[in-house]
Amino acid sequence: MALLDTMYPMWKEVSWPAQERFGCGPYPRTLLPTLPILASVPRRFARYGLPYDMVKRALEAISPPPDLVMVGSVMTYWYPGVVACVRMVREVWSHVKIVVGGIYASLCHQHASEYLGDADEILRGPLEDERNWGLLWNLVGEEPPTPPSFALDMGFYPSPQFSIVMGSRGCPYRCEYCASSVLFKGFYQRELEDVWVEFVSEVERGVRDFAFYDDALLYKADTWFLPFLEKVIGLGAGVRFHTPNGIHVRYLTPEICRLMKRAGFKTLRLGLETGHFKDRLDHKLTREEWDRGMAILRETGFSPDQVGVYILFGLPGQGREEIKDSIEFVKSYGLRPHLAYYSPIPGSKLYPLAQRHSCFDLSEPLCHNNAIWPCYPGGFSWEERSRWKHLVAPGR
């Protein structure tokens, strides 16, 4: 079994940009001709990651050829990279079985079926689902073994600068702008010991920066999260934790925050979404819960420079004043606002409204790209970007 991650710096001869703080990007990119449907967008079109020719040579060097190649997909608007990857695999091995899964394959299954003709199967939903698991093994002529439980194996990365922790899948909420419930039905929390074994394995390899990828990290925190933090404190390994997915403010308690502080949480991202609490598209936060959470963070020693707050930007029908008010609301607490640019997501409750408000044809997944501001009046412009960047900047 082998893993080829085209977003990982595997070869020294590739000029990889210096990583930012705590192991964050950026990534090398290759500029490409802008596609006609994006011609009105004043931004460059590029492919990120390892060079195409180098990836192909890496595949050609694998001997003997594999029986099966599994291709993952992430954002819907990144699908041209998936198409290129599948075609590359087919060029290298004309008879190998190819399976595509992931977010794009799940949310845009019909589109993927049309554009990924070289693939043998396009799976919708988690691999361990009984139907997907059966299709996978039937392709190679084998009887399916017992489906695996969800687990993370980072051992394929030889010298990682950071790693991830994930103790749950799914989300108990059904927010109108989100597709978490489409990608994974229900909400599932893992056994503490399974998460701990994965974490310790990475610590022993020298990793010190960890990001939580849970969609609802603090929900039912006593199931695994709080005992996990207590074990981390007892380990004393000097690790640093980050929450790029954003956490639910309503579940912050003095106990949770004290343990997070002692365990080594360095960057907290909070999901405010909007400061207009009476006009929310979700039911996950009230003004009273927000104020209580802010007081708890202060009392437990989290400094303002550790806490960033996500504000949804470019929702269909959203007024500029709402965004401006939300930015000012966050700053009134001494915190840094982060604009979370909206991407229309097929299958989400808000998607039909996005189709009506967008100046782009959302049947083309390229137009889901939040970098083009698909539902912001007039779409992306550098003038508007500068205006909003100025408003969110510290001290403004």
Image: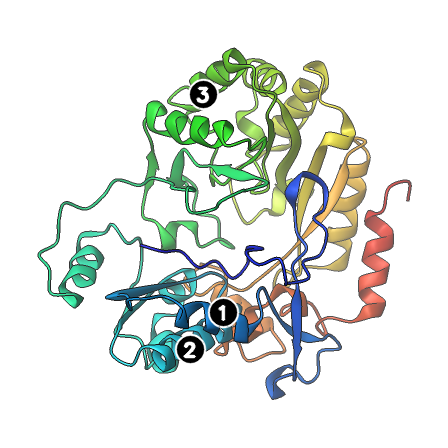
**Type of amino acid at the residue the image marks with label 2:** Met
Rendered position, 98 above or below 193: below
**Disc 2 versus disc 3: nearer the observer:** 2
Place of residue 128 in the rendered image (x, y in percent of width and height, measured from the top left): 25, 50
Place of residue 120 in the rendered image (x, y in percent of width and height, measured from the top left): 25, 74
Question: Is mark 3 in CB contact (under 8 Å) with mark 1?
Answer: no
Q: Say which residue appears at 19% left-offset and 46% top-offset.
A: 147
The local crowd at label 2, few if under 14, some if 14 to 19, many if 20 or more residues have their Cα within 10 Å, is some
**Type of amino acid at the residue the image marks with label 3:** Phe
Q: Which residue is mark 1?
A: 55
**Type of amino acid at the residue the image marks with label 1:** Val
Q: Which mark is residue 88?
A: 2
Q: Is residue 247 left or right of residue 141?
A: right
Q: Say which residue appears at 67% left-offset and 47% top-offset.
A: 311
Q: Which residue is mark 3?
A: 228
Q: Earlier in the sequence, mark 2 or mark 3?
A: 2
Farthest bottom residue in view: 36
Q: Earlier in the sequence, mark 3 or mark 1?
A: 1
Question: Is mark 2 in CB contact (under 8 Å) with mark 1?
Answer: yes
Q: Earlier in the sequence, mark 2 or mark 1?
A: 1
Dividing the picture into quarters, in which one does residue 336 lie? Answer: top right
Q: Secondary structure at mark 3?
A: helix
Q: Secondary structure at mark 1?
A: helix
